[in-house]
Amino acid sequence: MNATRFDLARLRQGLKPFKLHWFPRLRSTNDHASALRRRGVLFAPAVVLTGHQTAGRGRGSNRWWSSGGSITVTFVFPVDEHLSPHQIPLVAGLAVRDAAAELSGDPSIALKWPNDVLHGEKKLAGLLCERVSKADLVGVGVNVNLDPRNAPKALRQQITSIAVVAGRSIDMTDALIAIAKQLHAAMSRRGERLFTETLQRYDAHHALIGRKVSVVEAGSKQLVSGRCVGIDSHGRLILRSRRTSHAVIAGQVRMH
């Protein structure tokens, strides 16, 4: 599982209509994309890609650990005013899930609301979506050829990779092109139609349905627990406890 290099010439062709911005080393692709966008020098659609990310961010205070077998990238899209910021991870997450299923040949790859892609209960990919200067930044971290045995000890039992699922190494250039195509197709269906189509498919791959979960809500930090029955028409996670239901717009999820 040592296929770690990108073919930049092939990427520039295969990623179209995205414009590729390549950096051998960055602290965070989302931070760098945000800075470039605020300076007025990054235009959508674009891809900010690094070969080595040193300080990747997850949701809240979480950090994203990556290795040479990981893709760490930020896709830049024109903002879709029909979608709320909390709905973008659902649209983008489903696209990344579809790409991972295609690359691995395993249709059981699932989604964990709001921004994780799983195989079994192990994390395969994560997203960090931010709205900056009239652009939607979709940060994606995907374990492609990563060997979990080489991860920090605390993570080894929690993560997996496309190569592990597929039982073979995956060409990194092919993987990024596949993810880009799925994301472009998903995000090109603008507005209400885009989100309606997402809702119709999301729960079919949703790992939380039927599970008892606890969520620390973003903002209020309130802890809410219940059995997940899916997502509603706004993209909120619905938890049911006895006779009450609670709709969560964003938060940190723990499965029981």
Image (spheres, grey):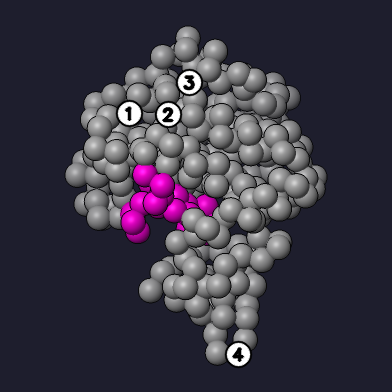
Q: CA distance from mark 1 to mark 4?
A: 47 Å
Picture layout, residue 100 above or below residue 215: above
Instruction: Name the residue tied to disc 2.
Output: 175
Q: Dot 2, crowdedness within 10 Å: few (<14), some or many (≥20)?
A: many
Residue 68, how many percent across, how many down? 31, 30
Q: Amino acid at mark 4?
A: Arg
- Which quarter shows the N terminus? top left
Residue 170, disc: 1
Q: Amino acid at mark 2?
A: Ala
Magenta span of residues? 106-124
Q: CA distance from mark 1 to mark 2?
A: 7 Å
Q: CA distance from mark 2 to mark 4?
A: 45 Å
Residue 186, picture quadrant: top right
Decide: marks 1, 2 in contact (CB < 8 A)? yes
Which residue is painted at 45% across and 61% down in the image?
Answer: 207
Residue 23, disc: 3
Residue 12, how many percent across, how many down? 53, 14
Residue 215, how many percent across, how many down? 51, 71
Indicate yes or no whether the magenta region holds residue 143.
Answer: no
Which residue is painted at 50% across and 77% down in the image?
Answer: 227
Q: CA distance from mark 4 to mark 3?
A: 52 Å
Indicate yes or no whether the magenta region holds residue 111.
Answer: yes
Element under label 1? loop
Of marks 4 and 3, the one in the foreground:
4
Instruction: Name the residue tied to disc 4.
Output: 243
